[in-house]
Amino acid sequence: EHIELLSGIHQALKQALPEVGTGYAAKLRAETIQADPRSRLIAVAGHTLEKTTAFSLTYEAEPLDSWRALVERPDLDLVIVANINRDHGAIARAALQAGKHVVVEYPLSLEVAEAESLIDLATTQGKLLHVEHIELLSGIHQALKQALPEVGTAFYARYATITPQHPAPERWTYHTEQFGFPLIAALSRIHRLTDIFGPVASVSCQNQVWPTVATSSSPYYKACICSAQLRFKTNLIADVVYGKGETFWQASRILEIQGDRGALIFDGDQGILIQGEQTLPIDTGSRRGLFAKDTGMILDHLLNQAPLYVRPQASLEALKVADAARRSAETGQTILMPA
Ligand code: NAP
Ligand code: BLA
C-alpha cells in the first residue's frame, strides 16, 4: 500500500508543477524542475505578459495570464509561489484551497495571522506547505553551526547587510506595500538567528525610509535603514541591520558572534574563528545552487518522504519576531514576545 501511494504521487508529479513568478527565484526553480526526471513545469503565471511568454517558451510551459486561473487547473500537483511578497499569502491560500501542495519563497505572508491560518489550512487539507529558507542551506550557516561550540557561551550576535544601489530602481523591492516591512521581507536575517539561538524575549527596532521624491505620494522609496535589537531567551543580545539604496556607499555583509571563549566573524564569504591568540579560517563554500538544493529536497520529500530542512512553523516564529520589530519601529516601544 505504501509503495503504491508513493508511485501514484510520483506519476502525478511527473506532469505537475506550475509556478507563479518569472524572476530570479522562479528561473532557478524552473531550471531544476525541468532538469529533474521526476518533475515537469506545466504552467506559469507572471506579471507582465511579455516576460510570462518568454519565460514559458524557455521552459516549455504554458503561459497563463492570472494566478487564479493557474491554481484552479486540475492537472497540477504543486504550486510554487515566487513573486512579490504582498501576494504570497493570497496565492498560497487559493492553491491550498484548490488542493495543491504549495511552496512559497519567504516570507509566507506579510501578516502573522494569515501565515498562521495558512499553516492550519495546509494541515486541514493534508497538503505540503513549504516555506523556502535557503539561508539555512548556505555554506555560511552550516559552517557557523558547526563552529559555534568553539566560542563557548555566545552572548552577542550582529548580522548586518548593506546594499548600496545608485539609482534605486522603481521595482517592487523599493515599494512599501509590495515588499513589506524590511525585516519581514528579508526574513532570513532574523530566521538565521532564531534557528541558532531559539526563541526571542523582546524586540526593539528603528526604521527610516527615504521617499523617492520628498513631496510626492509615490509608493516607491530610494533607500531604507532598518535596525533591530533582539534579546533572546538565552539572554543573548543581537543586532540585526538591513539597509539598501541610494543613501549607502559601501556594500557589507557581516555576521559575527561573540562568546566567552571565542568569536566567529563572517565578512562577505570569508569566515574566521578567533580563540585567544589563534585565528582559524573557516570554509564557507558557495552561495549558489541553494534554490536547486531546496527544489531537490521538495521532490525527495514528496516522492520518498525524506525530511525537509525547515518547517513552516519555524518561519512563522521568525515572522512573529519580524512583525514585533515592525510594531516597535511604529510605536517607539520595546515589544515583549509572548512566553
Ligand atoms: P524578481 O526577480 O524581482 O521577480 C519578481 C517576480 O514578480 C517577477 O515575476 C515579476 O514579474 C513579478 N512582479 C514584479 N512586480 C510585480 C507586481 N507589481 N505585481 C505582481 N507581480 C510582480 O524577484 P525574486 O528575487 O525572484 O524574488 C521573488 C520572491 O522570492 C520574493 O518573495 C523574494 O523575497 C523571494 N526570495 C528571493 C531570493 C533570491 O535570491 N532572489 C531568495 C530568497 C527569497 P515582471 O518581471 O513581469 O514584473
Ligand atoms: C535573498 N535576494 C534575496 C531576496 C531578494 C534578493 C529579493 C529576498 C530578500 C532578502 O533576504 O534580502 C534579490 N539578490 C537579489 C537581487 C540580486 C541579489 C536582485 O544578489 C542581484 C544580484 N541572489 C541573487 C544572486 C545570488 C543570490 C545572484 O540574485 C547569489 C549568487 C543569493 N539572495 C541570495 C541568497 C539569499 C538571497 C543566498 C537568501 C538570503 C540570505 O542568505 O540571508
Image (cartoon, rainbow, N blue to C red):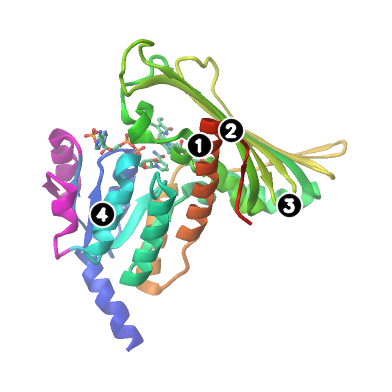
Q: How far apart are marks 3 and 2 (CA)?
A: 20 Å
- Horizontal and vertical percent position of residue 172: 32, 30
Query: Percent position (x, y) of residue 220?
Result: 34, 22
Task: Report the span colored magenta.
Answer: 47-75
* Inter-mark Cα distance, 1 to 2: 7 Å
Please state which amino acid type lies under the numbered disc 3.
Thr
What is the number of the mark on residue 34?
A: 4
Q: Looking at the figure, which quarter contains the C terminus?
A: bottom right
What residue is at 51 percent from the left and 31 percent from the top? 330
Element at badge 3?
loop
- Name the residue tied to disc 1: 326
Which residue, given by chain and number where applicable, does mark 2 sit on? Answer: 205
Say which label, 1 or 4, has the lower sequence index: 4
Tag 1 and tag 2, C-beta contact below 8 Å? yes
Whether the residues at callouts 1 and 3 have beta carbons within 8 Å, the answer is no
Single out the mark in the foreground, 3 or 2: 2
Q: Residue 234 carries which label?
A: 3
Q: Is residue 324 above or below residue 301?
A: above
Question: Splitting the image into four quadrants, where does ligand 2 fall?
Answer: top left
Question: Of callouts 1 and 3, which one flags the residue occurring earlier in the amino acid sequence?
Answer: 3
Between circles 3 and 4, the one closer to the viewer is 3
Q: Which amino acid does label 4 sit on?
A: Gln
Horizontal relation, residue 179 to residue 22: left or right: right
Badge 3 or badge 4: first in the primary sequence: 4
Quadrant in which residue 240 is drawn: top right
